[in-house]
């Protein structure tokens, strides 16, 4: 019984680790192309994103040289028009830039330098809440843009999500270990009672 419980604990831990690692993937935008003005225009990043699944907790890595490019998140309307007057969060000017996907839905990123956006340096992705889930409908209204806001709240949310997931795993392990301890105590008490009964029988005339 104790061996079976130990095996169950191992299986749960491995499953939790696989789920946690699968839920947090690092996506290098454009792969070897990086974050730049693509020769193939906007279709370059559209094609790259079409083969990916983006999930809350994943990270986008924008590889670019500082002062050569930047990254800004926009609403869909601003994205389509390459209008940088109202960004969602602050513009990231130091490369490479890591952005954690903290909310499900459609997200839009561009480079605001010169004519880079109109030349195709723009990325649109759909983020799902969990692996395998469909992203929310595009009809969902985007969050209200804010000029030069602080994007640190998104990172904090992602960290809190990770902590919650870790506590869930710890809670499961605690329950299993308690059950294992109770099972071992039960076997020990049973053996003790059996030994006492045998000794009593041996003492009878």
Image (spheres, rainbow, N blue to C red):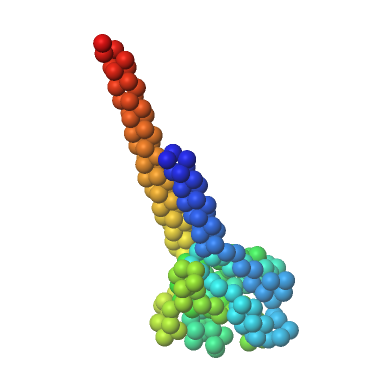
In this rendering, the count of numbered labels is 0
Q: Residue at x 49, y 72 (%)?
A: 132
* Residue 161 vertical position relative to residue 68 in the rendered view, above or below: above
Q: Residue at x 32, y 20 (%)?
A: 198
Residue 166 appears at what percent x and percent y? 45, 52
Which of the pair 32/51 is nearer the observer?
Answer: 51
Q: Residue at x 46, y 73 (%)?
A: 133
Which of the pair 12/17 is nearer the observer?
Answer: 12
Which of the pair 90/188 is nearer the observer?
Answer: 188
Residue 80 appears at what percent x and percent y? 54, 88
Image quarter of residue 183: top left
Question: Seen from this angle, which residue lies furthest bottom?
Answer: 81
Whether residue 197 is visible: yes
Side (left or right) of 110 relative to 184: right
Image quarter of residue 186: top left
Side (left or right) of 101 relative to 42: left
Question: Seen from this angle, which residue lies furthest left?
Answer: 205
* Residue 174 vertical position relative to residue 21 in the rendered view, above or below: above
């Amino acid at each position: 019984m104790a061996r079976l419980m130990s095996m169950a604990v191992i299986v749960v831990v491995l499953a939790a680790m696989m789920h946690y690692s699968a839920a947090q993937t690092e996506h290098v935008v454009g792969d070897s192309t990086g974050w730049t003005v693509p020769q193939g225009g906007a279709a370059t990043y559209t094609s790259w994103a079409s083969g990916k699944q983006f999930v809350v907790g994943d990270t986008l890595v924008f590889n670019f040289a500082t002062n050569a490019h930047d990254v800004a998140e926009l609403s869909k309307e601003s994205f389509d028009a390459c209008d940088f007057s109202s960004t969602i969060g602050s513009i990231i000017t130091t490369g490479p830039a890591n952005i954690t996907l903290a909310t499900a839905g459609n997200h839009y990123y561009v480079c605001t330098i010169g004519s880079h956006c109109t030349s195709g340096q723009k990325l649109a992705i759909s983020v799902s809440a969990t692996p395998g889930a469909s992203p929310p409908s595009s009809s969902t209204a985007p969050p209200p843009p804010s000029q030069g806001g602080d994007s640190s709240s998104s990172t904090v949310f992602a960290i809190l999500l990770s902590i919650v997931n870790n506590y869930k795993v710890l809670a499961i392990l605690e329950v299993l270990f308690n059950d294992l301890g109770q099972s071992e105590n039960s076997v020990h008490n049973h053996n003790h009672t059996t030994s006492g009964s045998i000794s009593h029988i041996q003492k009878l005339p």
